Image (cartoon, rainbow, N blue to C red):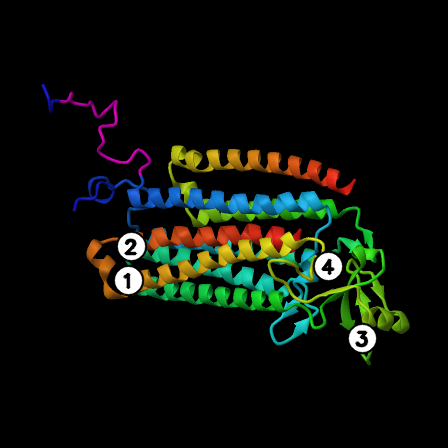
Amino acid sequence: MAGHSEKVDSATLWGGGGSPFRLSYGKQWMWFFLVSDALTFGGLLCTYGYFRHQYGDWPIGEEVFNAMPFLGNGFPLLYVALMTFILIVSSVTMVLAVEAGHRLDKKAVIKWLTLTVIGGAFFVGSQAWEWYHFIHGSHYGVILTPELMNDGWATIREVVGGGFSLDYGHGQMITDPALVSQYMAEPLGAIQGANMIENEYAPMIPQFGNLFFFITGFHGFHVLSGVVINLIILINVKKGVYDERGHFEMVEKVGLYWHFVDLVWVFVFTFFYLV
Amino acid sequence: MLRDDLDLDKEYALSANHDEEHGKVLRKKIWKVTIILTAITIVEVITGGSIKQFYEGVPNDSWWIIKWGFIFLTLVKAGYIVLSFMHLGDERKNFRYMVLGPYILFIVYLIFHLFTEATYWGEIIHQ
């Protein structure tokens, strides 16, 4: 009897002939991978939320991230908005590449995939700049003063026409030159920039720097791998690998990964920069 | 090698290749979603840059409306990316629910537990 199996009635039972989800296994497993990756990012962002809820007080995105390359400070959220826009546009060019693949239009696939790679590379470069700026901090850093506002921590700012003022955040300033120079002469503590131990953006919350490095770093690593994977697929398209196969499903699979990277950034953007 | 998904069954919604006419319809939809996503991002940045959480040290009492607005817009954007760009909306219903259902359930569970714990722990520390 070994080796015998009952014949399955294909009208009522699934006989193993096709996928119950009507998906190719490659795409299905890409989705499974993305769900597990989404759980990792979900866990990280929930940890971020945990510390925000624990501390109650948290640095404000538009006060921390207000610099533009070559232009200096005073542009709240503009650069990160540009980064977000570029990532969304690169997601659009990717979905256009997938659409062109379904029409077996190789030239259009190459065009859109190339633009996707360029957009992704620009995003990675922007994130490197953001990190550089975040690590180096503001021009003069922060000092600890015997004031009650912001637990005494103030950012030193240059005043137009000479001298300094102390910015305690949330729109609170000390501008009296005598008091400012007294505090600056004998600071109770000083921090400039950010590392894993302390940061000037939230001197009382070391986790702010840790979470920024870990979450944007993990996302940036995803973008970097995405750019590399897209580049490999682009080379394959150019070499004609998918013409032989008769379909461009590989473009669709890497497209899923690329859209996922954009999806994660939408959440990082909201919770790190906006709210 | 015979691929069951491509060679045996030509009815897979997305694996099947389509013609130019169908492509035109799809491209129109892609550009529509692009405009929606861009508009949402612009609205978010303008709101985030112009409405402050604090005015000279005094908390803005209606900030919670803005905050929930941001979270709502984020979920709208995520929905468009997942359902339209990743084509999950065009997949079979059972697959869609299998991907989204357990994930959403688990994340809501995690948020509830972590935030409840964090708020409680924060109250003890601040006392």
Q: Amino acid at mark 1?
A: Val
Graded by Cα atoms within 10 Å as few (under 14), some (14 to 19) or many (20 or more), the crowding at tag 3 reads: few
Instruction: Using the rendered image, report if marks 2 and 4 lie on a common chain.
Output: no
Residue B12 as seen in the image, left or right of residue A195: left
Determine the chain carrying the residue at label 1. Answer: A
Query: Mark 2: which secondary structure?
Result: loop
Asked whether the residues under marks 1 and 2 belong to the same chain, the reply is yes
Per the model, the C-alpha gap separating discs 4 and 1 is 46 Å
Label annotation for residue B65:
none
Q: Circle 1 sits in a helix, a strand or a loop, which is it?
A: helix
Tell me the distance, in whole angstroms, between the alpha carbons under discs 4 and 3.
23 Å
Label 1–label 2 contact, CB within 8 A: yes
Q: Is residue B58 left or right of residue B71?
A: right
Tell me where the magenta segment starts and ends, as one range: A5-22
Magenta span: predominant SS is loop
State if disc 1 and disc 3 touch (CB < 8 Å): no
Q: Which residue is mark 4?
A: B50
| Residue lying at 38% horizontally and 41% vertically, measured from the top left | A32
Q: Earlier in the sequence, mark 3 or mark 1?
A: 3
Q: Is residue A20 magenta?
A: yes
* Kind of residue indicated by mark 2: Phe
Q: Is residue A63 above or below residue A37?
A: below
- Which residue carries the number 3 mark? A159
Q: Residue at x 85, y 55 (%)?
A: A148
Q: Looking at numbered disc 4 in the image, what kind of residue is underneath it?
A: Ser
Mark before the other along the chain sequence, 3 or 2: 3
